[in-house]
Amino acid sequence: MRIVLLIVLPLLLFASSAVFGQESSRNRAIAAFDAGVQHLLDGNAKRASKSLRQAVALDSTFVPGLRMLGIAYDLQNDYANALKAYLAVINHDPYFSRVLYYHTGDVYLRDGQPRRALEYLQKFRELQAEDIGRFGLVGEQETATEQEILNHKLEQRILSARILTDSINYTNATGLYNLGAPINTEQNDYFPFFTNDLDGLLFTRQGKDGDEDLIEGARRRPERNYRTSRFGNFNTNQPEGMCTLVRDGETIFFTLCHEDAGGGGCDIYSGILIKGRIEEVTRLPDYVNSTTWDSQAAISCDGRQLFFASTRPGGIGGSDLYRSERLDDGSWSEPRNLGAGVNTPEDEEAPFLSNDGETLYFSSMGHRGLGDQDIYFSRWDAGRERWSKAINIGPPINSANRELGFHLSADGRQGFFASDRPGGRGGLDIYGFTLDEKLTGKEVTYVAGYLTDSLSGKPIADQEVPVSGGAVFRTNYAGRFFICAPPNQQLPLSVDHPDYLPYRRDFAIPAWDNQSPYRVDLRLTKEALELPAIPPPPPPPPAKIRQETARVLFAFGEDAVNEGQYELLKQLVAGTGTQRIESVSIVGYADEVGQEVYNLELSRRRALAVARVLEQLGVSEDRITTAGRGEIAGRAGRNLNRRVEVIVRFR
């Protein structure tokens, strides 16, 4: 700033003499202006601003005085008054100085207004197309200053303004805090991944000897601290790296660095998480893993996209990010490099994908950032089918230190990452923050589907479940499949199984907090056996229709019929006889505790549970109707409100 000031001073002095004549008020303005300039040359910006204010007060159209007053305020870091003076010059004469647009943008940037800064910095660049004569003698005097700005300052300032503009969303990343002990230690703790309800987490801890282990944290209630322990059944004296769970809470991907003849230094594995243990551990195929280092897998919300870091040959830099897609037959596609928008000649690692699959977060050493290693994000450009140029996520997440391992909670509101910034407990510590609701991307609802036999209730495993016009999902050993679906829309599902009738249904998917998935049940029905035609018997005499009722009670939050209520239903059927039953009406209810949409679904499941018991007791399915009426208001007698009303009509 001082160099620019000394260059423009002779011109401004000349301009003041040329603009003003010998009128007394203008002479006083010039005298105050000259005094202000001298104070600036003496390094006293405060006294200079006083004199220059006098000059401007004597004549508000004294443009050189306004310009110098802005510089005086700028040197005192009084950004508001500096901007006021600079903008007054531009408004009075847009072609007084081209350099002034750069100074205005620079002050806006330092004042924390990157959008306005970008506007003036880009205007300065655009004005380079104008003939220098348009700016008169000021333009000629500022030529050397402009070249210095263009060669060494402008692009970096524009980049900084863009970074802060694109990451302005994250100025709402408030409440930054260190997770503290026992999660953070004197060692390096990083790569956090939280369960959907935030009551559990997995992360990596690196010991003093460099060995990496997976650590599990768990708490019983949100107000309690986490308890930590070594996780899984494979922690060894060799590194086990970053792990990630599919949002279904069952499928896990992790890194093992056991060197053997079958793979490289580190490889990616998958497994099934059952009762806190990883079962069915499988190394991903050789075309996904390579002979080098492959690690830090991240999985999309629905488990159909796999992102990971690799140093395999053919990349752009050291460690690059790659993506594989889950094919309809369950296998993985060949990995594809994410391209130059994401990868650089340096290292990129630790990917994380948002719920809607449109934003990729990762750490990089190669993109221009705020510190050692920063966290960036890239948007999926569907039109061009590529990832956009990476954007620095900005402060307060990034700092002058190292940041990596970005993670968002199931609802997209709680964020987590690791950093070695000052004030931590040791090396890398895990930090959390709160993200404003409007900045979390498109909402999704976690949907857990269960495919079963309508009569026996047995799960139907390894069965394709296509979404009409979309992806194909497959049931696991428990007949379960998992979908991340847009809320407040219909989810059209179909099943074609050789042993069952074709199944087609559109499910209404509500908005959901995703701490637990929204459940849908698909019950397949077998085709009835064709029997030879039998002449109809003579019609029986009309029989009098009678009615019996029963009330089946449920525990809080439960939809399973207990032993006592089973006996009640058994006696009801035995008393009427299954052959005499004309119809059975089953209506489920819930108490008023909890969300209305949840209680409606719970009442429906209770009714279906009673229906399955009656079918097991011999009541024909086509004589049963079920309905869920939701909650019954009132605190008194809540235990009686958690019920199913059964009305049996029989001859």
Image: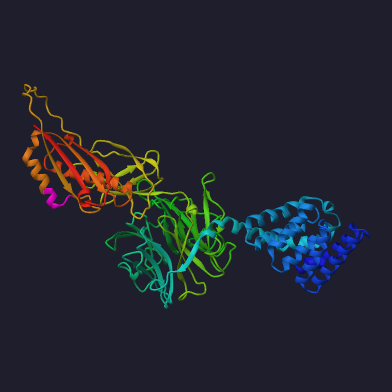
Asked if residue 178 is among those painted magenta in the image, a careful observer would answer no
| Colour option used | rainbow
Percent position of residue 273, x then y? 30, 60
Name of the residue lying farthest toward the right: 22
Q: Nearer the viewer, residue 179 or 78?
A: 78
Percent position of residue 635, x then y? 26, 52
82 lies above or below 523:
below
Q: How many marks?
A: 0
503 lies above or below 358:
above
Provide the residue span drawn in magenta: 561-566
318 horizontally vs 537: left or right: right
Percent position of residue 292, x then y? 45, 64
Residue 94 seen in the figure: no
Q: Nearer the viewer, residue 39 or 276?
A: 39
123 horizontally vs 379: left or right: right
| Snapshot quadrant of residue 144 | bottom right
The residue positioned 70% from the left and 56% from the top of the image is: 121
Q: Nearer the viewer, residue 605 or 218?
A: 605
Quadrant where the C terminus lies?
top left
Percent position of residue 285, x then y? 38, 56
408 lies above or below 403:
above
Asked if residue 564 is among those painted magenta in the image, a careful observer would answer yes
Q: Main secondary structure of the magenta part?
A: helix
The residue positioned 37% from the left and 38% from the top of the image is: 468
Residue 155 seen in the figure: yes
Quadrant where the N terminus lies?
bottom right
The residue positioned 25% from the left and 48% from the top of the image is: 590
Q: Nearer the viewer, residue 519 or 309?
A: 519
